[in-house]
Every structure is written in C-alpha cells, then in structure tokens.
Amino acid sequence: MQSSPVPADEAARLRALRAIGLLDTPADPAFDNLVELIRSVFDASIVAISLVDAERQWLKAAVGIDVRETPRCDAFCAHAICQDGPLLVCDATTDPRFAGNPLVCGAPGIRFYAGVPLRPVDGLAVGALFIADTAPRVLTAAEHDRLIRFARQAEALIRHHQAALEARREHDALERAIARKQAVLNRAAVGIIRITSRGIIEQVNPFAQQILGYTADELLGRNVRVIMPSRWAEHHDEYLASYLKGRPPSVIGIGREVQALHKSGRTIPVHLAVSEVTIPGQEEVEFIGILSDLSELYRAREREQAQHRLLHVLHRGMTDFATLMSSDQLWSFLKDALCDLTGSDYALIGEVVPVEGRPGLKIHAITDLSWNEDSRRLMERLSSGDMMLTNPDSMLGRVFAGGEVVMTNDLGAETRRTGFPHGHPPLHNYLGVPIVDQGQVIGMYAISNSRNKVDEELLAWLEPFTATCALLINLYRRINEQARFTRELEIAHAKQAQASRAKTEFLSSMSHELRTPMNSIIGFSQLLLNNRRQPLPERQAGQVEQILKSGQHLLTLINDILDLARIEAGRLVFSIEPVEIAAVIEESVASVSTLAEARGIDIRLPPASAARHRVLADYTRTKQVLINFLSNAIKYNRDGGRVELGWAPVEDGGLRVEVRDTGIGIPADRIGELFQPFNRIGAEHSVIEGAGVGLALTKQLVEQMSGQVGVSSVHGEGSCFWFELPLAAGDEAVPMVAPATAQPLADDDEALRPRVLYVEDNPANQRLMTDIFEDFARAQLSCAHEAALGIELARAEQPALVLMDINLPGMDGYAALAALKADAATRHIPVVALSANALPADVERGLAAGFADYLTKPLDFARLYAVLEHHLGNPPDA
Ligand code: ADP
C-alpha cells in the first residue's frame, strides 16, 4: 500500500481547514441531513463528509461507519483532496493505492469509493464528500454529476458554518467590548454623564452618582441643569442652543474647572471635559461629560495655603513683633490671623490677669459682632480691654480660668453655655484654646463660626500658633514692664534734674546774695587796716586782719560754689584762646607766695630757659585751676616743705602741668574720692581750712576746656596734682610785628594824645596790645583786667575809645557795655568789642548790642589800625 500523497498547497489548505472551524465540532443536523439524503439518493452503505487534518481525517457527518476519525494515511479522502475532480475507486482490492488499506482488508471491508474534494474557500481542499460500499460499483454519469452537486452543497454548508462562526465570534467580541465599556463606565474613577443635545441626562456612571450624591434613577431623564449651580444652570439651555448653532464652545472639547451642585446643595469643585459625540445613523448629537472631583485637590491646596498663611503669621509674629507692639497692632494682628487661618467669622484673643486673686480675662482684640447700639458699646469696652471677664463657668471662663480646651460644633446644643441675648448673631461652632506658658494659663483665644468643623486636627494644626501666642504675650509683658520701668526712670530723672536745677539755682542765688555783703566786709576791713591817719591799735588790727582773711576765704569759697553751679547749669562762658602757660604760672605763684612764705614753703619753678608753651584755654580759668592746686599744695604741706612746678607736652597733643608737694599725701584707698564736691577726705577733722569744693571745681573747669586732671600720691610723703590742656596750634609766641601801613601820628605830645582803654583779663593779650600802642604813637593805652575796673577807669580817664574783651571774669563785655551806656559820664565813649567769639552771629550780636565795631582774635592788625584811626579821628561829642 502506498502512503497518502500531500497536496502542494498543504500549509494553506490546513490554514483554511482551521479557519472554517469545523474540526471536532458537535453534530450538526444540517450536515447529518445532507449525508442521510445522499445515502438515500445513492443507496450507498457509507456516506461521509471528511475533513483531512494534518495527521488524520475527521468526519463531520457520516452514515454507515462508526468511527469518527481514522489516520490520514488510511484515508481515501487524503488521496481525493489531491485531485481536481472526484476520485473514483470501483474495486479497491484491484487498486494498488488501496489494496492493502486496513479499511479494505479489515472492517468495514471497502471496495467502492467515490470522493469529491471539498473546496469551500479559495479553492483549497479541506476534505472530501464521499460515498463508499463494501461491493465494487461503477457510477453512472448522472450519479457522478449528482455527487458533484452534493459536494457543492456541502461546500455551501461549510461556508455557511464558517460565516456563522465568524458572526458569532464578532458578536462575542462586540459583547466583550460592550462589557468592557460598561465596566469602564461603572468602575471608572471619573464621573461620566451622557446628555442629549437638549441637555437631558441619558447616562450617569456610578462615580458621577457618587460625586453628585444622586442615584442614577434620580438623574436619568432630568435636565443636566439639576447638577449645576444656579448661575450656570440659568444659561445652560441657551448655551447649548447657541453652541449647536455654531457659537465657539467654552467647555465643550476644552475642559476646565467648574462648580457642580451636589444633591445636598453644596457646590463641589470639578474638572469638566465635555465631548460632542455623533452617533452614526442618529441625527442629533450627544454630549459626554467627564467629571473629575477636585474637592480633595482643593482641600490639599487649601491645606497648603493655610500652612503657608500659618507660617507667614508665625514668621511675622517672630520677626516683626517690635513693630507690631510699638504700633499696638499685636493683638488685632493675632485676632485677624486666627480668623484667616481657621476661616472663622469671629475670633477673640486676650490675656489672663488676676482679678482679686482669681483669673480674669482682659480681651485685647475681638471681632465686632455687635447688632445694636448697646452691643456696640459693650464691644467697644471689651475690645479696649476695659472690661474684665471673670465668670469661670462661661464658655470663655472654662478656657481662661479652667485651662480647658472647649470645642463644639453645635453651640446650640451646648448645655453649659449661658444663653445669647436677643439679636446676637447665630454661632454654630466654637473653639476656645488656653495659651499656656510654663504650666500657667497666660491668655486664651477663641474662634466661632469656622467654615470647617472644629476638631482635634485643627487644634493640633494650631499648636505652633498657640505657642507663638504664648511667646508674644510673654514678650509683650516684658516690653510693657520695661516701658513702665523706663517711664518711672524718666520721671525719677526728671525729678532729679529738677532738684538739681533747683539746687544749682539756690546755690547761685545764695552765692550772689552772699557776695555783696562779703564785698563790704572785705572792703571795710581793708579800709580799716589801710587807714594811715587813724591806724588801728595793734590788737584790733590783728582782729580786723582775721576778719579780712576769713572774708577773703569765704569769698573764694562763694566764688568757687558759684562757678561750680554755673558749670552745672551750663552757664559758665569760657574764652578759649592761646594762653602762655609760663605767664599763668608766674601770676598764680605770685598770688600764693604770701601763703607759702608764711609757712616757709619753697615754691620751685622750672628754669627761665625752659621751653615756652601755649595752651588753648581760658586765661583766668587756667589761673584759677593753678592757684587751686598751688594753694592745696601749700595747705596740705608741712612747714618748710617744698612745692615744685613743671610742664611738658604729652603724646595726645596736650600740655601737662604738674604741681608736686612734699605734704601729707593721700591714703591710697581714698584717692578715688578726690574731685568729689564737698568731700574733704578726712581733712574736715584737721585744722586746715577748706570746704572740699576746690578740686571738684578744678576738674570741671579743666574738662570744660577740653582737658583732664589727675593725681598721684604717696601717703605721708606728698602728692602730684596735674592737669592737661590742649596745646595751641603752632604753639609759639605771637609775632609782634607792626604792619607797614601803620603810620605814627604826627602829634606825640603825651598829654594831648587821646587815651584808649583796653579791658582784657589775659595778660598776654594786654602785653600784646601794650606793644602795639608803643608803636602807635597817636594814642596812649590803659589796661583793666576786669570789667568793673574798666568801668571805673572809663569814668575817671574819659578815654577816646574803649577796646572791650567779651569773655571777662565776673561781669562780661556785654554787661560792661550796658553799664557804660547807662552812665551819662561814659555814654559817649565808643566801645569796640575785641573777642575770640568770631562767628558771624557773634559779630552781629555785638553790633546789635551797641558795640561801635567788632574786632576778632587773633588780631588783624590792619583792621585794628583802621578802627583806631576811624574812632580817634572823630573827637568825642562832649
Ligand atoms: P579743700 O581743700 O577746701 O578741703 P579741695 O577740693 O581743694 O577742698 O580738696 C579736697 C580734699 O583733697 C582736701 O580736703 C584734702 O583732704 C585733699 N587734698 C587736696 N589737695 C591735697 C594735697 N596737695 N595734698 C594732700 N591732700 C590734698
């Protein structure tokens, strides 16, 4: 037996066989009926429709044979499919292809076979329709044709089956697609709503139902306006209509954030994307809206913004508290921050202060919730902190007195609250939080009508705010305390200053009052002592001398006190100019020499060849300082002791003048007390006279002249008191060169020469002027070292001109001018000011006061000569 042949298009043929989907399918009456019909037509014992698979033949329908399947190699059909036309085997036993075939040799013992290849699709033979018999047979031509027609019918059946199969497959696929879509719709995490072109809801998926709070039944068939807030709902129909007429869309095909209306009436932020859908075969378009719930996103955004605001509040509270406090904005800032942070209508914040030993609440800031005039007045009192709340059982009291956090979202149901008066705005929720510092309630805040419910989460979120409040209240208290302290201090200072002014005024007026009688005492004592015609008996002279000495001592003391008082009051005027220190020393030593001689004390000056120096100082005051040091060096010396004077420039551009003595010295532990007014450091118990004013005044005088004083001392051996004053620029002698323009006047008859009076306390200046007048032959010069003497001389000598220094000890130049002008005897004499006060304002003031001219120091010689000539050229009006 030969093995079955394989057709050339085997692979394609097998693909076609798979495609028709008939293999191994259950019995199909259409095929069964066909084979039944063929058997009756041909009266054959076996009829079957065979499908030739790769390794087998499988019978889709068969009669007269029990097996459904045989190996391909045994199948006659495997041969049939290789032919174009039918395969006819009249007697298999004589056909070498089939003689050994088990179906021929064994059961069912086939002899006759007639098979037509079945090519249902694309001419590919998937099997064969055959008839067979166990006896040899020959087909007639008519039978042959008929068999072929049956084969065509079988092919049609196969194609039909295939089409049905494909239709079913398509249907299944469609069903699956629909199911998938439904699943997508049902389970999508976005809301999907389909509406008609007239806005009627046709479909709404579960997610949309969940977002909107409706069931599908509640929405289907209703206008989509039901889920829109009124401001959009009103215009929706209109909008759809105009869109359908071609107006550009605002949501359709674009998508944007809008508000949807929940069944409960609240609005929900959603993202809405609407697409227009055209259904094939349907004229009207539809719209599909895809809604995404943005509530969570909004909440997250809100939380983030709230967090931002909280941080901002904390930051501002910490960094800007000084401004907030100074402008009294702290409390309203915190109150407003609370409203803003919690989205509340009302807030208050206050501080806990004890009221009769129990905690009371002083409200610092509160949102105005007044509803009439009475309540407005109450709010004003509350917010001004003028009213204390003390009831520990109220909604506030439980917080500030009990330290309890009070939290309710239904204030109406709160049984423990005291009722609200008629007209009070409704409050629904309330949160009261104590502000605690080191275990003590120092304040509280409360909010009401918060947009969100008040809960533990909110409380926890507010914790940093609460902590900041605690910090700020503490700071507020401390700053207030400090401000109070500063105020008290200021008041104390003012009182002290007033007392000190009063003291100064008292001292200065007392000293003035004392000076006048002192002048008489001294004056008459001198008269008594100097009376040559009726000299006093020796004993009385001694007594008067004592009166004179004591008077002089008292006068010095009074003068010192007066000066000290003037310095303290800032009323002592200094005439700062270059002062030759050797000259001051010389004069000072001369003043104390009698005192020194009386006790056998040797005053030693530097050799005459010592360097000469000039300091910038007030001549008279410098002398006062030196005389003070010198008289102390004598007073606190031992009899027969020594006082040494010296000076030398110091590093910082000053000159140090030292007065050394070999006296009692000062105990080291008391040196610090020197220069204190009225402190005599123990000398009050000695016989040495004094009042403890000299050194204090000395120090003040030197400091006023931009200098300093100091001392070093060895107790029992002696002391060295020193002062330093700034060196004058150039620090050299004033050139005494007469200008070339100075012309000696023709008339040099001494008696006829007019007299010029120079009132000047500084001897160096006096000397300079004397030198100038030696060359200026036209006039003769007299000098007075103080104003009172100057006035006397003016009266007596009737000078043609007075040159007046301004800063004179005691009476100054202005007072002297006024005195001269007030006196008929001197009124006519021109008075020219000569001063170191050289500012234009000084000159103006001088001229306005009545000086005939105003010359400034250092002297401009040409100006001096011009002034002299001008005034001396005009003889006085008698
Ligand atoms: P007074 O001499 O009127 O007491 P001062 O103010 O001049 O007042 O001096 C204050 C005190 O300083 C003196 O009482 C004396 O105890 C002490 N003192 C001043 N100068 C000397 C000195 N050269 N040697 C020792 N003690 C002195």
Image (cartoon, rainbow, N blue to C red):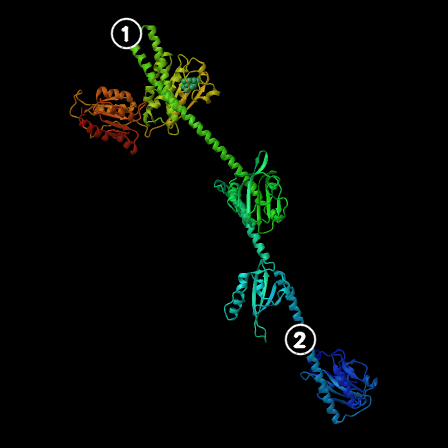
Nearer the observer, 634 or 572: 572
Q: Please tell me how crowded label 1 is: few (under 14), some (14-19), or many (20+) other residues with Cα within 10 Å.
A: few
Residue placed furthest toward the right? 106
Figure quadrant of residue 804: top left
Residue drawn at 48 percent across, 20 percent down: 669
Residue type indicated by callout 1: Gln
Q: Would you say 694 lies left or right of 17 here?
A: left
Query: Which of the image's four quarters has the C terminus?
Result: top left
Q: Is residue 191 above or below residue 318?
A: below
x, y (%) of residue 478?
Answer: 53, 36
Q: In this rendering, would 871 be left or right of 565?
A: left
Q: Which mark is residue 718?
A: none
What residue did someone put label 2 on?
170
Which mark is first along the chain, 1 or 2?
Answer: 2
Where on the picture, by quarter, is residue 795?
top left
Residue 380, horizontal then vertical, whole percent: 51, 42
User: Which residue is identified by label 1?
Assistant: 534
Residue at the image position 29 percent from the left and 7 percent from the top = 535
Which quarter of the rendered image does ligand 1 occupy? Answer: top left
Which amino acid, mark 2?
Answer: Glu
Q: Is residue 192 visible?
A: yes
Q: Is residue 147 above or below residue 346?
A: below
Q: Nearer the viewer, residue 722 or 470?
A: 470
Q: Please tell me how crowded label 2 is: few (under 14), some (14-19), or many (20+) other residues with Cα within 10 Å.
A: few
